[in-house]
Amino acid sequence: MMKRMSLAVSVVLALVITACAPGGSTTTPATSSAVAASAAPTTPATPTDVTVVSAQNVFLAGLYVADAEGYFKAANLNVKIVNVQSGNDSVAALVSGNAQYGDIGFEDVIGLAAKGEKNLVIVHNILNRVTLTLVMRTDVAQRLGVSRASPLEKRYGALKGLRLGVTRPGAPTDKYMRYYLRQAGLNPDRDAQIVAIGGGPALLAALESNQIDAYQLSPPTPYIAADRGIGTILIDGPAGDIPKFSNFLYTAFATNRDWASKNPQAASAFSAALRKAMQKVKADPAGVVATVAKYTGSTDLATTKKVLDALLPALSENGCFTPTQVSGSLDILLEAGLIDAKADPAEGMLWTTKYNTC
C-alpha cells in the first residue's frame, strides 16, 4: 500500500506543482519582530520547508491569509501550498512523506490505522460542521417535486436512480453521498449511479452539460449553480441543514508524527500562524476576501464573500479539540456508517494539541 501511495502522490505533485498558491506561496516577510513573536510560541532557528496539500477551498481561508500576510515567513517557515483534487490525494501525500500537512477527516486517519498506517495525527481543527452542499439540476428537482424546504428524508430519497457526481471514490463527497442513500433505505451500489468527476469546476460543468443530475461539494460551485439557475440547493452544509453534522469535527490539518516529533518548533509555529490568521479572518472577513479569492483561483469576489460569510460559523478560530468533541464526532461517524468501529478518542491516539496552545 505504501508503495502505491508514494507513486500516486509523486504523480499528483508533479501534475499540480504549477497550480500552487499564487507565486508558489512566495510571501512578503513581515517587518515587525512582534509579528514573529505572536506567530508562534517557539520559532525554528533555521528556515523549515513545509509542504501543505489541499484541494482549493474557501474554508482554508486561514491557510491562505497566513501565507499572504507573511505569518509563516515571520515564523521561519517556507510554506508551499500544493493544490490537489480531493482529500484522497492529501492522505497519500501525507503517508508518503511528500507533504507535512494536509486537510483530512478523522475517518481517514481511522481507516489508515486499521490498515496498519498509524503515523498520521490530526493537530489543528479547521471545521466544526460538514460543509458539503448538495445541488441538483433544477429541471430534475422540479420533476421530482423536491427542494431545500422538503423533509430531509424526501431529499435523501430523491437521489434514487440519479447520476450523482463526486470528486473521487472514497473522498468525502463519495462517502457522504453514500450515507444519504443509505438513510433513504437505498443501496448506493445499486440504486444510483455514482460518477467520479473531479474538482469543483468539473462537477459544475458536468451538471450544466447534463452529464450528472446532482453533486455535492463544499461551496462555492454549488452556490454558483444555484445563482445561474441551473441547480437547486437541496442540502446547505454551511447552514447546518443536517443536524447530526452541524456540530461535528469534519476537517482538520493532519501531519506526519515522525516529522512533527523531529520538528516540534516548526509544528508549533505552523499552528500559531494559522490561529493568528483565523483571528484576522473572523475579525474582518470582508478584508480578506480578495486574498481568499486569489488563492482559490476565483475572480468572483461577490461569490467568495458569500461563501466565506456562510462558512464563518463553522470555522474553528483556535484550531483546538477536546476529548468530548472528538468522542462525540466518532460516535456520529460510527452511527453514520462512515467508520466500522469506534476508535479511541483519547488524545495522542488520533489527535493531539501538543503543537497548539489549546
Image (cartoon, helix red, strand yellow):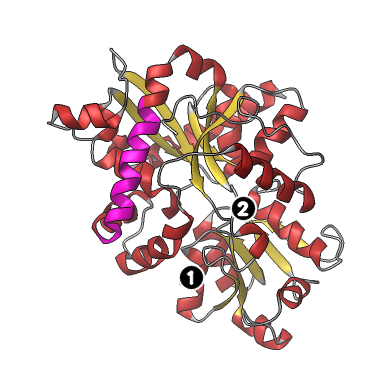
Q: Where, by quadrant of the figure, is residue 157 drawn?
A: bottom right
Residue type beneath disc 1: Tyr
Above/below status of 64 relative to 138: above
Magenta stretch: residue 144 in it?
Answer: no
Farthest residue in the left direction? Answer: 31
Residue type beneath disc 2: Thr
Residue 106 in sight in this render: yes
Query: Which residue sits at x=77%, y=29%?
Result: 114
Label 1 Cα crowd, 10 Å radius (few <14 / some 14-19 / many 20+): many
231 or 37, nearer to the observer? 37
Q: Which mark is residue 245?
A: none
Around disc 2, counting alpha carbons within 10 Å, would you say few (fewer than 14), some (14 to 19), or many (20 or more)? many
The residue where tag 2 is placed is 167
N-term mark: 1 or 2: 2
Q: Which residue is mark 1?
A: 223
Q: Which residues are magenta?
A: 269-286
Position in image of residue 15 (x %, y %): 49, 37
Quarter of the figure with the N terminus: top right
Q: Foreground: 212 or 300?
A: 300
Report x, y in % for residue 180: 74, 63
